[in-house]
Image: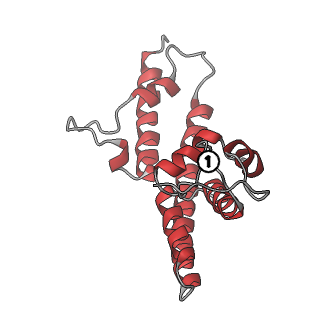
């Protein structure tokens, strides 16, 4: 059961907490529901009240989300910070290092995707040919083996990029062959 909080100058309503941290009210309630943010005490009238610890926790959560940490990673970081402090820095470093590796992998994937898309855009002849090689490339399955198509999640993005680039060349050749002479 939630405790009844006395009203003091250090307590904030959910709206005031939202304004002071930049986190939407519904997001605050969501964080409470999933237990990433503790359920706050309430006044005798049932109003949630927050104080400096909640401001600090919510600011931490918001900044962590801005840096791309998942809610599970944030939950782990909050649990580490709530411990006695032994080995805290090393444990936080492990979580952050894994997250950094994920970010670097995503950047590499995005660069590969950008190269493929850039190549496809350059090869598109601005509508002078019948059909559009870019649309054909994006519509063509990855495999022409007749087998079951792999799902995008089952392929690394760089593999998809290579297959897409190869498919685009085949599509372009087919389009050129269909052009009237």
- Image location (x, y in percent) of residue 161: 46, 46
Q: Residue furthest top?
A: 180
Q: Is residue 163 above or below residue 77?
A: above
Q: Quadrant of the N terminus?
A: bottom left
* Nearest to the observer: residue 42 or residue 12: 42
Q: Residue furthest left?
A: 147
Q: Is residue 63 above or below residue 98?
A: above
* Nearest to the observer: residue 108 or residue 120: 108
Q: Report the number of discs.
A: 1
Dividing the picture into quarters, in which one does residue 46 lie? Answer: top right
Give me the residue at 59% from left, 83% from top. 89
Give me the residue at 73% from left, 51% from top. 12
Dividing the picture into quarters, in which one does residue 144 lie? Answer: top left
The type of colouring in the image is secondary structure
Q: Is residue 134 left or right of residue 22?
A: left
Few, some or many C-alpha atoms within 10 Å of disc 1 (few <14, some 14-19, many ≥20)? some
Q: Residue furthest bottom?
A: 86
- Image location (x, y in percent) of residue 50: 67, 55
Q: Is residue 25 left or right of residue 39?
A: right
Q: Is residue 20 left or right of residue 179?
A: right
Q: Is residue 6 above or below residue 45?
A: below
User: Can residue 92 be seen at all in this image of the molecule?
Assistant: yes
Dividing the picture into quarters, in which one does residue 177 lie? Answer: top left
Judging by the rendered image, the residue that carries numbered circle 1 is: 48
Give me the residue at 63% from left, 56% from top. 5
Give me the residue at 71% from left, 53% from top. 7
User: Can residue 114 be seen at all in this image of the molecule?
Assistant: no
User: Callout 1: helix, strand or loop?
Assistant: loop
* Nearest to the observer: residue 103 or residue 148: 103
- Image location (x, y in percent) of residue 30: 52, 45
């Amino acid at each position: 059961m939630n405790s009844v909080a006395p009203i003091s100058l250090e307590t904030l309503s959910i709206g005031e907490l939202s304004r002071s941290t930049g986190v939407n009210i519904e997001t605050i309630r969501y964080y409470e529901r999933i237990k990433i943010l503790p359920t706050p005490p309430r006044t005798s009238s049932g109003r949630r009240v927050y104080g400096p610890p909640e401001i600090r926790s919510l600011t931490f959560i918001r900044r962590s989300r801005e840096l791309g940490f998942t809610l599970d990673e944030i939950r782990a970081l909050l649990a580490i910070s709530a411990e006695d402090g032994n080995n805290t820095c090393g444990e936080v470093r492990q979580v952050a290092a894994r997250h950094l590796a994920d970010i670097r992998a995503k950047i590499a994937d995005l660069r590969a995707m950008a190269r493929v898309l850039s190549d496809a855009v350059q090869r598109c002849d601005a509508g002078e040919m019948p059909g559009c090689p870019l649309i054909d490339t994006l519509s063509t399955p990855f495999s022409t083996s007749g087998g079951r198509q792999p799902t995008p999640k089952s392929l690394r993005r760089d593999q998809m990029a290579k297959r897409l680039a190869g498919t685009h060349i085949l599509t372009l050749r087919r389009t050129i062959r269909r052009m009237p002479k």
